[in-house]
Every structure is written in C-alpha cells, then in structure tokens.
Amino acid sequence: MLDNLEIRDPVHGFIYRDSHEREIIDTKIFQRLRFLHQLALAHLVYPGAAHTRFDHSLGAFHVAGGLAKALFLSDSDRRLVRLATLLHDIGHGPFSHVSEPILRKHALPDALPNKEESKIHEMISAKIILENDELKRHLGDIEREKIVGLLAGTFGDTYLHEMVSGPIDADKQDYLLRDSHFTGVKYGIYDQERLRNTLRIHDDNEDRVLAISIDGLHTLEQFVLAKYYMTTQVYRHRIRLITDQMIERGISLGIEQDKIGWLTSLYRYDGTSDFMKEYVTWGDDRLMSEAWHQKDSLIKDMFDRLRERRLFKCILDVNINDFPEPSTRSFVFAGPKDFYKPLEQRVAKEFGFNPHHVIAYGVDFPPATKTESQVPVLHKQTKPTLFNDESALFKSADQKIREQHFHIYAPVETIGDDKQKKKKFREYREGILKIIQELANPQQPLQFNAKGGA
Amino acid sequence: MKPTDFLLCLIDASGGAVAGRTLLQKRAFFVTELIGEDFGLKFDAHYYGPYSPTVEGTATQLKNLGFLQESSTGFGIISDGFEMRRYDYALTDDGQYLVRRLRETPTYKRISDATRRILDADNPNYMELSIAAKAYFLLKKKAATGMTVADLIKEAEKYSWNISQESVRRAIEFLKSVGLASDK
C-alpha cells in the first residue's frame, strides 16, 4: 500500500513510496548515495551533470514499480523488485565506476578470486545489503537474501532478474532519461511509458523471460538509439574519458607512489566488516578534499589539476584503420593490456613528460555485455522472434557502440598557435605509432597508416 | 586462450567460415563442452538454447577489427521463429594471417579436434544443433534424476518450437554420436 509520501523528481514527476520504503531511504547507508555523483566529474564537461546515485536509485525504484504494475506482478514480487532496484547501487564507492578498476587491482586475492570478471561494486552491494545493521533493522534475513539473489540472478524467475539487471532493466530506463536531463543532451529521451506498457512476460515452458510485444518494437529501437547517442555523446565524451582516467591515475599514484595509508585501506578490499564500515564513510567530495590536503603528493597534484580544470589532452586517438598490419591491430585492440605501462614510459621519455602523467587507455565495450539482441519479440499469430532479427536499426547501433579506439592522454599545457599545435600533435602521433609498432612487432620493419599525418 | 582467438580458431577449424550466428553459438557451445573448458564464453540457458553474449560481442569485435567478414542473406519470416536473416561469418585475409600463428598452439589442436567430431557427426544444421544444445542443457540439468533420451524427446516437444519428431531424433543422434548423451 502506497501512502501519500511523495518525492518530487525532475525526470518522473512524483515518486511515491510507502512508509517502510521511506524508512530504508532514510537510512544513513542509503543517504550516503547523495554524495556520489552519478557521472563522476562529467560536470566538468556538462555543468548540469551534478546529479547523484541517490536521485538515480529513487528514479530506478520508481521505474521498477511502474514495470511491476504493468506486468501484473504479485504484491510480494513487486515489493522485492522495488527494493532490489532501490538498493542496486548501494555498494558504489567514490566516483562510482571510476573506482572499480582500482578496487579490483588492490583487493586481496582471497576476497576477490577472479579480478578480471568481478563486478566489485555489486559484490560490495550484496555485502552491505546482507550485513549493514540499519538495513537489518528494516529488512528481514530472508528478504535481504532474496534481494541479493534477485540482483545476482540466483533467486527468482528470470524476468524478475531482468527487471533489475538486464538489457532493458529499470536501471537503464532511468539513467538514460536522467543523464540526458541533467547533461542537457536531448538524445537520451525515449518513450518510457510506451516501453513499459509493451513489455511482456514470456513463458517458453522452462523459463519466464522479459519480452516485448511487436507493438513496442520501435519503442525498443528508440531506447537502443538513446543508449547509442548517450554513449557516443556523453559516456564517451573525450573530456569525460580524460577526467575519469585522471581520477583513476591520481588515486593509483596516491596508493602506489605516495603510499597514503587511508587511501590504501579504502581500496584494499578484504571483505571484512572493518573494511565495509570504513568504505561507506567515503564519497566523492571527501576523497577530493582529503587528496587536496596531501601536501607534496602526486595525488594532490592530479586532483589540483581536476579542481582547476587543467586537464590532460588526448595526444593520440587511433582506431583500427590506423593499423593495416593485422598483428599490430590485434596487439592494440584484442590483446592483453600489459603493454600500456611500457608504452606510457616510452612516450614519456620520447616527449619529455613525467611518466606518471602519461595515460594509455583503450576505449571499448566489454564483449560479454548482454545487449537487447536476444529480447524475444512477441507476435500476435506467429512464434516469437529475437529483437536482433526484427530490428533494422539495432545491429548498426550495436556495431557502432562496439567500435574500439585507443587513446593516450598527457599534460600538454601550452603549445602555441594552431599551426604549432597541429605540428606538435603530428609529432606525437608519428612518434607514438612508431613506439606501438616496435612493441607489437619487435623484429619487423615499421608499417603503419600514413593517414592523419604520420 | 582469449575469446577472440577461440573464435578465430573455431571458424578456421570449421573450414574458414560458419553459416549463421546461431550455428556459431551452438558450435562454440559444443566445442567448449567437448573440450571441457569455457574460454570465458559463459554460456547461459536461453530461449533458443545455450547462448553466450561473449560469442556475439566477440564476433562483432572481430568484424570491426577486420578479421571476420559478415554477410547476410534474407529468408523472410520463418514460421518456426528461427532466424529470418542469416549472418554468415568468414575469416578475412587478415584473420587467416592471425590464425596461422595460432595453429601451432596445443589449444588450436583441441578446438580443431572437437570441431571435427561435430562436423563428422552427420553435420547437423543450425536448427538441429539448437535443439541438441537445448536438449543437452536439459540433460545436464536433470542428470541427477536419470533422464533418458526418450524423456529428452518428450521434453523437447515442450519447447514451443514448431519442430518435427525427425529433427528431434536427429538432434539426439547427434548428441549420442559426439559422446554427450547415451541411451542408458
């Protein structure tokens, strides 16, 4: 039963929650999400993008409630889906996803056996839901276990899991609209109401999965295009990628070079309750502030640059067309990333940069990501087909999203007028491509594409 | 071996091309089952049998990288709900260049041997391979309850696919011939 407990939201209008849900929202552990920006430092590019994980979690919770109603879920399933969505981001640390590679790198091996595959914020979310004392007071043991199981896909019907974690889940349905609203980029807008009302539960005798009616095909295409535009215009905006990488590098330098005790403890995930208690006290602003107070440190230097918006520049942006020789192309875009560090060091030496300030970064889309391709499309008279086979647009957008780039960022402060800048960037490009070629094929003669100035 | 190399080896061992992404999914599934190694593909139960988003994403990645060529053929709407458009994958010259290096590895031989077993088992088409894959998933899931081939045929009839008894029989024969099912 929903009480008249409303929250005014700029994206969805009024968000309603009952008194029990309000108690959970009012916990300290949930309120901390107000101090985690949804898009880290994207406000350095889009000044309006100051929204937080708190707003997004409430929005996703609202969307999940709407989906549950449209799909005629039972009261207990509806409650479970709403709560799971509300808590799905509870494990994020400072700067959200930007923190994750550092957490994975510094986690104790026993606490995180498979570092490559683990989504550590989801693991931490599960621990918080199961172990946090405040949440224990408001949610029973079985309910907390069900929430964790639903988020992980180990409890409940598949369609329930897909509502909270899947290609068209409540999370994405909210964040596309929300990020679009707050960045001011209109491309993320799609018809959420129509999408919600054309989703169906499809039973194939073994499993019940989330599907879409043929009437919603174009709405789902609109959703896919919204994701594509937001990815290219916002999530992969060049300055945003640079700021994310500067945060990550700054924190890594603070741990590995400055050897700051509190920072090392924050990222050395060991699964203990002591770690969790400390972890949840941190947000973006606190980490920023503490970093600025580390005198004569590399982390302070990097975070000063972020505060003053003295950002690194992209001195190399290459894609597959820049590497006609297949083994080099494979080396850069399909191989292990262990050449990044030696490349950074050689670039620093070649061009006189501080080696800590050269960042190699592969822009890609994890191949294992579940996309909308396998969503069943339900027809009125014939058997279901797959969205991938029905949509004229999906494959092009999906292929474009998966296009890989390789970037090098460095602190290029002042390099003269436009003519001098072009000359300098041409030198960077020629020099770095030569180094990559040598690293990929130490025994072979140079061969790379002359297009673009090399 | 990483997923990109696995797919390159699989397609090379299949004669340099695979006709249809459903066939690519199912062949990759059976090769990993026969070898007993996942190669990071993480197959999951799905409406049309085991499906790996990694196989799909990696094939697109290899296409973007110029190592695979994708061509499509339209078939219109098929009443049983399978692909209306078939996407075929073939190694490009650059893809073949990379595979030549991989052919020397022991893993290539294991992939090649497993692929050979599948191709030798009367080379079932993608639909029968899909039925076999879904049946095999069931077989594994219900192994503890002693499911028989006869039970499997009954289960397969429930898939809500419009399939013939003959297709089911051939799919089961395929499982038996590659050693993934028996009458006992």
Image (cartoon, coloured by chain):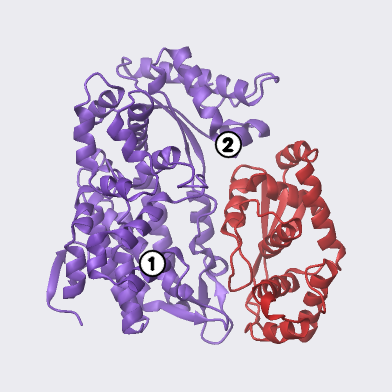
Chain colours: A purple, B red
Q: Residues within 10 Å of mark 2 (few under 14, many from 20)?
A: few
Position of A287 compared to A199: left or right? left
Q: Position of residue A120 (x, y in %)?
A: 41, 50
**Circle 1 Cα neighbour tier, 10 Å, few/some/many (<14 / 14–19 / ≥20):** many
- Evaluate whether residue A237 shows in this view: no
Q: Position of residue A165 (x, y in %)?
A: 41, 64
Report in which chain the residue with disc 1 lies.
A
Question: Given the image, on which type of amino acid does mark 1 rest?
Answer: Val
Is disc 1 on the same chain as disc 2? yes
Assess whether mark 1 and mark 2 are in contact (beta carbons under 8 angstroms). Answer: no
Q: Is residue A286 left or right of residue B122?
A: left
Using the numbered discs, state the Cα–Cα distance from disc 2 to disc 1 in whole angstroms: 32 Å
Find numbered disc 2 in the image and state the secondary structure of the residue it sits on: loop
Quarter occupied by the C terminus of chain A: top right
Is residue A111 something that shows in the picture?
Answer: yes
N-term mark: 2 or 1: 1
Quadrant in the picture for residue B165? bottom right
**Image coords of residue A242 (percent x, y):** 35, 34
Q: Residue at x 35, y 42 (%)?
A: A99
Q: Is label 1 in a helix, a strand or a loop?
A: helix
Q: In this rendering, is residue A194 above or below A151? A: below
Depth order, front residue of A293/A314: A293
Please state which of residues B64 and A17 is positioned toward the viewer in this rendering.
Answer: A17
Q: Chain of mark 2?
A: A
Residue at (76%, 59%) from the top-left corner? B34
Give above or below for B15 relative to A315: below
- In the image, taking residue B73 as reference, residue A1 lies left or right, namely left
- Please report the residue visible at 22 percent of the width from the left and 58 percent of the height from the top: A30
> Which amino acid, by three-letter code, is at mark 2?
Pro
Pointer 2 residue: A336
Q: Which residue is mark 1?
A: A164
- Where is the N terminus of chain A found, in terms of image quarters? bottom left
